[in-house]
Image (tube, rainbow, N blue to C red):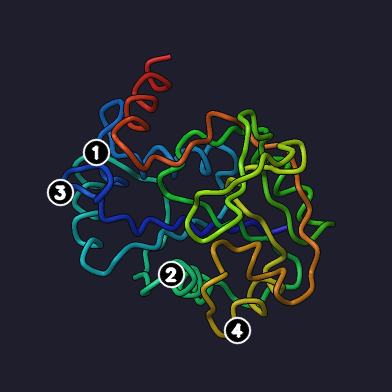
Amino acid sequence: MKRYAIIVAGGKGMRMGGEVPKQFLLVGGKPVLMHTLQAFHGFDPQMQLIVVLPSSQITYWQALCQKHGCNIPHQVTAGGDTRFHSVKNGLALIPQETNAVVGVHDGVRPFVAQDVLLRCYILAETKRAVIPVIPVVETIRKITDTSAVHSVTVPRSEYRLVQTPQVFEVNLLKRAYQQSYIDKFTDDASVVEAMGVQVYLTEGNRENIKLTTPFDLNIAIQLINE
């Protein structure tokens, strides 16, 4: 079955506290986004990769690829106002496929494990909608009023933390993204679920963190060194 990946990298670097967008920060001598591309290319060299960037960053990314000798084949397209619209733009580069699956992945998650990629893509061939998750290890409290004064403990065994790639049958995801955007569309699974489609959970890997803060970047450097 044919495989695609849409790698969404629309960060502006605000929470990192610097001017360089987080997907372009250097870890182990090359930009985070290149590590992410390598993870997918290493998993399946035949996979068609699509990188979605803000239009203002595309030329900079192309220059980085030249500078660091990144020769992984991939297409680049401009993102939209929200993640939803960026994914939709990426999907536009994929033809209607009756025998294909597509994963949507955060560009700043460079440490997705190869076995997680394999599970997600293989399961999506039959389950149609698959997302990687990990257990919650800390106690969770639910705020019960608007002032955030009152709260209750909730059973953490009933919750999971969601990661990417979220992998779907291509035509299913294309149909899902024909819906009008609403605020509750925080990831691809929520878009697909809005059509009444059940999403299948599979085990992710804890190292597959989303690099958002300087603390996350320090963890990334440590993981690269290991």
Rendered location of residue 58, percent (x, y): 25, 62
Identify the image quadrant of the N terminus: bottom right
Please determine whether, in this image, residue 13 is positioned above or below residue 90.
above
Mark-to-mark CA distance, 1 and 2:
26 Å
Circle 1 sits in a helix, a strand or a loop, which is it? helix
Name the residue located 26 percent from the left edge and 45 percent from the top edge: 24
Residue hosting label 3: 19
Mark-to-mark CA distance, 3 and 1:
20 Å
Which residue type does callout 2 highlight? Answer: Ser
Q: Is residue 120 left or right of residue 90?
A: right
Q: Is residue 210 left or right of residue 91?
A: left
> Residue 119's image quarter?
top right
Circle 3 sits in a helix, a strand or a loop, which is it? loop
Which residue type does callout 1 highlight? Answer: His
Q: Residue furthest top?
A: 226
Residue 117 versus residue 85: which sits nearer the camera? 85
Residue hosting label 4: 178
Which residue type does callout 4 highlight? Answer: Gln
Rendered location of residue 126, percent (x, y): 84, 57
Tell me which label, 2 or 4, sits earlier in the chain: 2
Circle 2 sits in a helix, a strand or a loop, which is it? helix
- Crowding around mark 3 (Cα neighbors within 10 Å: few <14, some 14 to 19, many 20+) is few
Tell me which label, 3 or 4, sits earlier in the chain: 3
> Residue 140's image quarter?
top right
Residue 86's label in the rendered image is: 2
- Crowding around mark 4 (Cα neighbors within 10 Å: few <14, some 14 to 19, many 20+) is few
Please determine whether, in this image, residue 30 is positioned above or below residue 145.
above
